[in-house]
Amino acid sequence: MQQTSRNQPEFSLRTCRYLIGDLFRVRVWIYWTDFLFTYAAGSYCFTQVYGGPIYQRHQGFQGSFQQTFFFFASCLLFYRAAMFIHEVVHQRATGRLKVFRFVWNVLCGIPFLMPSFVYYTHIDHHRRQHFGTDRDGEYLPLEQQNGWQILFYLSWCLVIPLLVVIRFLLLTPLAWLIPGFRAFVQRRASSMVMDPTYIRPLPGKKTLRILYIQEFACFLWCLVIVVIAPITVGQWPTPFLIHIYLMSVFIIFLNSVRTVGSHRWFNDGEQMTFLDQMLDSVNYPNNAWISELWGPVGTRFHALHHLFPSLPYHALPRAHRRLMASLPEDSPYRLTEEHSLTSGIMNLLRRNRRIIAQTSERPHGSETI
């Protein structure tokens, strides 16, 4: 059953906007410095996993402490670099990240097989009429589902890397050759979402042009890694492929855990009020050094981000502190905080068990009035 905000004190979005109005400026130099340093450090750690330049043949895993350290360091750094897709999509309207968006796609989007077009549907997650409904591909009623379904969602990290390669290496040329297959690929296999049943609306001409360019680049990249490189080297690069598969699994799993903790997931598919959408979202302002590892580029302030999607990531911590210092003690915004990701997920599981128990105890055939 969906929670409601009818008993909550009045919440003024205009007041919040006034309190942080000077923080909406996009500081482009922060984006460039953060991303390029993160990407460079991640690339260095990636090469150190097998002790050589990036074009050198992978020598396999020896299980040393140094190799293990660089593996997880490269995962966390590349995870942070990849999460700039969130800002790339949200800041499209400002026009100030046009060059940054292109460079991010060249360095991250294409090589990681997550070009920015697959995340355009994220904007629907922020539309007040779409949030939590079947038009929101990033929402599942996890609070009302069995715990094993949450584990099932987390297990997708094992197959997503393979499915992504199939999408760009096989489905892309098939979509070019089979006219009727193009719409299926665009609607069913071109979105980075939680809900596997989500159907993406067909894109407009401008978005379609971007989609064609980016998916063609991903196709060429897959072709080089899977076909051309093995023929050139004369040997199937099994250790290298295992390396990038394990790295992908770790990054996707970490992001999935972050996603589970980013909402309270109490909606059951109905349209929600704006206040309920905020209360469904979670902020994690504590332990910044740890929280930034699993919730980089501002994603740990998810409730604040839902209030102001255009607020740049570098301003979120300061904006949250200012709101917590200025809003009244009974402000509903204060209910968006969780102490840690662990506590947020554990609270979700407790509510889940309570709801499942209440449902099982309800007499068969009874209805809630």
Image (tube, grey):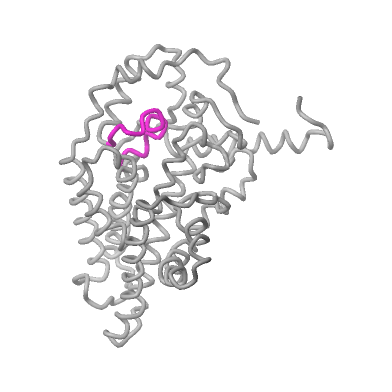
Residue at coordinates 45% horizontally, 27% vertically from top-left? 336
Q: Residue at x 52, y 36 (%)?
A: 130
Foreground residue, 205 or 73? 205
Q: Is residue 60 above or below residue 346?
A: below
- Percent position (x, y) of residue 312? 28, 35
Point out residue 364 in the picture as x, y percentages from the top left corner.
84, 37
Most foreground residue, 262 or 195: 195
Magenta segment:
297-313
Q: Does 184 sit above or below residue 4?
A: below
The answer to which quarter of the image holds residue 55 is: bottom left
Counting the numbered discs, the total is: 0
**Whether residue 369 is situated above or below residue 10 in the rendered picture:** below
Q: Quadrant of residue 190?
A: bottom left
State the image coordinates of residue 355 (x, y, percent, origin top left).
Answer: 67, 35
Magenta stretch containing residue 303, yes or no? yes
Residue located 33% across and 35% down the image: 287
Horizontal and vertical percent for residue 60?
A: 32, 75
Quarter-of-image position of residue 367: top right
Quadrant of image for the N terminus:
top right
Does the magenta run of residues contain 73? no
Could you tell me which residue is drawn at 15 percent across and 41 percent down? 29
Residue furthest bottom in the image: 234
Q: Quadrant of the C terminus?
A: top right
